[in-house]
Amino acid sequence: MPAASFDETVARLENVVGRRLNGSGRALCLEAFNENERGFRACVDEALRRGQTNPLGLLMRMVRDGDWNVPPSPTGGAPCERVDRLHARRLRGS
């Protein structure tokens, strides 16, 4: 995958936060992007939607948790959305 595409994806978060994603966090995100671009982009979207105080931190947590690499489900939905539903079910105990 071209680095520019990754840079453009991450820049959306960086512009909101006013900080750059650097160092090991950037390397980890680039690795996730290269493995599953669609899943990583879904996590960026989710971090923008949910990350009220630290969207970059939320993205890093999702990447470390492997949320970008959830296999597609027959019913569709973005990878991070499916992970959110799984977490909600676990919290309810179902």
Image: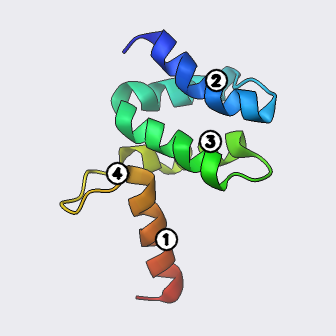
> Which residue is found at the position 50% from the left and 11% from the top?
4
Seen from the viewer's position, the closer of residues 51 and 62 is 51
Q: CA distance from mark 2 to mark 3?
A: 14 Å
User: In this rendering, is residue 67 above or below 92?
Assistant: above
Q: What residue is pinned by disc 2?
A: 11
Q: Residues within 10 Å of mark 2 (few under 14, many from 20)?
A: some
**Inter-mark Cα distance, 4 to 1:** 13 Å
Name the image quarter holding the C terminus: bottom left
44 left or right, relative to 69: right
> Quick check: 86 above or below 58?
below
Q: Amino acid at mark 2?
A: Ala
**Residues at badges 2 and 1 in contact (C-beta under 8 Å)?**
no
The residue at 43%/28% (across/down) is 33
In the rendered image, the vertical position of residue 5 relative to residue 80, given as above or below: above
Q: Residue furthest left?
A: 74
The residue located at (45%, 53%) in the rendering is 80
Mark closer to the chain start, 4 or 2? 2
Where does residue 73 sit, x and y in percent of width and height? Answer: 23, 58
Tell me the residue that label 1 is attached to. 87
Residue 48 located left or right of residue 38: right
Q: Position of residue 22 (x, y in %)?
A: 70, 22
Q: Given contact means CB atoms under 8 Å apart, are the residues at marks 4 and 3 in contact? A: no
